[in-house]
Image (cartoon, rainbow, N blue to C red):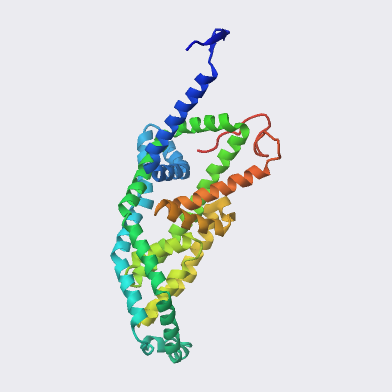
Amino acid sequence: MERKPTEGGVPQTSTFDRVLAAIVVGFLLLATAITLKPFLPAILWAVVLAITSAPLHAWIERHMPRWPRLAAALTSLILVLIFVIPAIGLTRSIITYTPGVLAWVDEVSSTSVTQAPESIKNIPWVGDLLSRNWELIAAEGKSYIAHFRTDIEAWLAWGVQQIENVGLFMFEIALGVVLAGVFLAHRKSLSAFVDTFFGRIGGPLGDALLERAVHTTRSTVRGVVGSAIAESIVATFAYFIAGVPAWLFLGGLTFFAALVQIGAPLVWIPVAVWLVASNEPGWAIFVVVWGVLVVYSVENFSRPLLAGRAAHLPGLLIFVGVLGGLFAWGLIGVFLGPVILAVAYELVQEWLRIPPGSDEGSPDTPAGGRRPPSRG
């Protein structure tokens, strides 16, 4: 095809040439998206981990400037200790104890009501009251379990089905950690590319939104996920000390309850009740005291300390993010969901703060220039 006359020595392409080029670029983008689709959760998880651990990696790199790859390997090792190893233990415990939970639901919903255990009668102050009303309490509890038995078993079966994908979950977690290490090893070049890319497509506004997205990702992972991990660790220690069966499984439930903003008491209070019913009132008191003094303290002190801006995110947003991420992305969505919604929420808030028609980005962006990168 002949080209149009040149201007300044540069050939002028026709409309057909531009349309053809757009089609080729669109096809390549579509093919790339299809190729990366199976790895998309792991890639997103790697990006989240790399952004969150960038300050830690920068600190390690300052202490070993001659070995940047070794610094990235050490950061990846820390991520393995924090995420991969606990995930392996949790999934193994869920696979082990879920059949027992299903059998317990079937047993409780079909057995007859018995008298109060001797341990209930020996509880100070309230033992007599509970033992006198034990039959009524047990009957009501049994009726509720029997009524919702089908729903409970359906949810547990769905959970077992999700655990059947544990291999994929572990692959995504491990691959995310490996990719995060690669991203951190090339942190400077990737940061320069991201700055240039968002600066080209959004100008100062793109820089401002990118900066907010980075800070929100870090604060959400540290505050929401980090505090849930801290709560589950201290609660799991109490379950282990008290000799509770499936203590690692209960620790995983505590993590999930803390992550969805329901609260760790949803787990350790039934554990204490079970200990009382098992004639272990001393350990039950220990679990309650530990939950009130230690777990509750960790929740109240760790979240504001780690979260920063994420401490002000709506709890409903985190709740929907965890459950929506679980349904949309699988088990790894428990981590991705709240981060994605938190970033989207903060970006909308940042966009609304900018006056209409303004091209200066955020109000705190220096006038006439791009915001200096501060992503570590």
| Front position in the image: 23 or 199 | 23
User: Is residue 236 visible from the viewing direction of this image?
Assistant: no
Q: Where does residue 76 sit, x and y in percent of width and height?
A: 37, 43
| Front position in the image: 371 or 293 | 371
The residue shown at (43%, 61%) is 255
| Front position in the image: 46 or 123 | 46
Quarter of the view holding residue 373: top right
Q: Where does residue 190 sit, x and y in percent of width and height?
A: 46, 32
Q: Where does residue 42 sit, x and y in percent of width and height?
A: 39, 44
Q: Measured along the vertical axis of the image, is residue 242 above or below residue 139?
A: above
The residue shown at (46%, 64%) is 257
Q: Where does residue 119 sit, x and y in percent of width and height?
A: 37, 86
Q: Measured along the vertical axis of the image, is residue 186 above or below residue 237?
A: above
Q: Measured along the vertical axis of the image, is residue 112 above or below residue 39?
A: below
Residue lying at the far left of the rendered structure: 96
Q: Measured along the vertical axis of the image, is residue 304 above or below residue 153?
A: above
The residue shown at (45%, 83%) is 140
| Front position in the image: 292 or 7 | 7
Question: Would residue 33 appear left or right of 308 to someone viewing this image?
Answer: left
User: Is residue 193 visible from the viewing direction of this image?
Assistant: yes
In this figure, what is the number of numbered marks?
Answer: 0
